Image: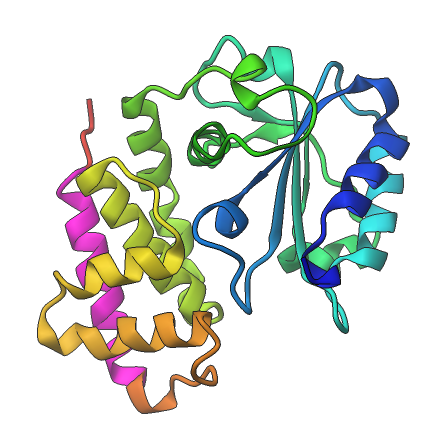
Amino acid sequence: MPERDRTDHLVALVRRHLGDDVLGVYAHGSATLGGLRPHSDLDLLVVVRNRTTYAQRRAMTEELLKVSGGEGRRPVELIVVVRDEVRPWRYPPHRDYLYGEWLRDDYERGLVPQPEADPDLAPLLTMVLRADAPLYGPPPAGLLDPVPPGDLRRAIVAGVPRLMADLADDTRNVLLTLARIWSTLATGDIRSKDAAADWALARLPAGHRPVMARARAVYLGREEERWDDLAGAVGPCARFLTGEIARYDDPA
């Protein structure tokens, strides 16, 4: 395993800051859905016994800023949940801590992540259970309940407006995530982003395929990220995807 893809230092970091409260650490995301890609994060879920303190969250954030991203290092997305706040399952689930590189500027200004309700945990916990990839502790099914299909659908649809608001600044990721949501709603499977793009490309109208194909190629490291030549096609493609997603939205 290349040094930049290793996670043992992250497991050690978590245990150093949270001690015996750590019940399990689990890989998910790209690493368990076909392998890490050039733009992939190292995605970890940590299950703990008790809520973290402000001091623990601050210290962990300060250290993650030093090891996440940068020259030769992959970005890290690390989420902490309290076992008794996600088991037994209830919606919306509660997240105790989040580190993600998209929030680096806020962290560097002194923001300390706070506990909050997070519907996005529904697909994340589903991926963790399906991946069954413990880095520390028992298999995830020993600590987590399965997410009911209705709550999974509700959670991933709820995130669509926020995604669309980020389309101009995070085009590749938004398009691929919309493709993943569409494929999950249609099939019940959670695919890697490139596999979801493949699934969507087989179903998109011809006029939208170049946009999705570009997003997939950039994600796989086969093309440079640029959208100027497709600028007029990105919005219509994203709106088509949200229209397909809306067909599966059950307001009940």
Residue 200 in percent (x, y) is at 21, 59
Q: Residue at x 41, y 59 (%)?
A: 165
Q: Residue at x 35, y 39 (%)?
A: 156
Q: Is residue 58 magenta?
A: no
Q: Is residue 13 left or right of residue 200?
A: right
Residue 24 against residue 29 in the figure, above or below? above
On the question of residue 247 being in view, the answer is yes
Residue 136 in percent (x, y) is at 71, 29
Q: Is residue 216 left or right of residue 250?
A: right
Residue 144 against residue 207 in the figure, above or below? above
Residue 110 in percent (x, y) is at 84, 51
- The residue closer to the viewer here, 89 or 6, is 6
Q: Quadrant of residue 168?
A: bottom left
Residue 21 in percent (x, y) is at 80, 18
Q: Which residues are magenta?
A: 231-248
Q: Residue at x 51, y 30 (%)?
A: 132
Q: Quadrant of residue 72?
A: bottom right
Magenta: main secondary structure equals helix
Q: Residue furthest left?
A: 205
